[in-house]
Image: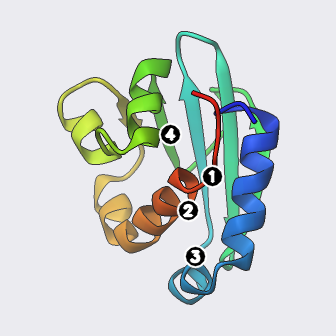
Amino acid sequence: MQYFSPEYFEELGKRLNADAEWTRKAASLTVKLTLTVTDRSTSYMLEIVNGVVTARKAAAEDPADFKFEGPYDIWAKIARGQTDFNTAVITGKMKFKGSLPRIMGIQPQVLRLTAVAKAIPADL
């Protein structure tokens, strides 16, 4: 399976919805996240409603609570565990749009989402 493909995000949604730790941490979470690969003009939205995740192809300009935008090489480094969202944003390699206090408030959920995503075998 190719990283950052429709199949990848479908698998991410399935794994999160079946993950006990995610379910516990995200039971009351309702949020929309858009993830964009800027140099490939590809975006996906993770829509989370009371912890239940659906993923779909999206446009970068679609309304979302949080948006992460960066080139493919930065996304690949996140997937490999060579960096994380916080470092990528702080160093300016990835752009973040949304409420900083709100995203900081859901760090446990974001960290679990990232951990589940990294566990998906994908071609980078």
**Earlier-in-chain disc, 4 versus 3:** 3
Foreground mark, 3 or 2, reads 2
Task: Indicate the quadrant containing the C terminus: top left, top right, bottom left or bottom right.
Answer: top right
Up/down of 3 relative to 65, above or below: above
On screen, residue 54 versus residue 93, left or right, reads: right
Q: Residue at x 57, y 76 (%)?
A: 29
Type of the residue with mark 4: Lys
**CB under 8 Å between discs 3 and 1:** no
Q: Nearer the viewer, mark 3 or mark 1?
A: 1
Of tags 1 and 2, which is closer to the observer? 1
First in sequence: mark 3 or mark 1?
3
Please name the residue that numbered disc 3 is placed on: 29
The residue that mark 2 highlights is 116
Nearer to the camera, 71 or 48: 71
Whichever of callouts 4 and 2 sits on the residue coming sooner in the sequence is 4
Three-letter amino acid code at disc 1? Ile
Categorize mark 4 by other alpha carbons within 10 Å: few (<14), some (14-19), many (20+): many
**Disc on the earlier residue, 1 or 4:** 4
Say what secondary structure mark 4 lies in.
Answer: strand
Q: CA distance from mark 3 to mark 2?
A: 17 Å
Q: Label for residue 120?
A: 1
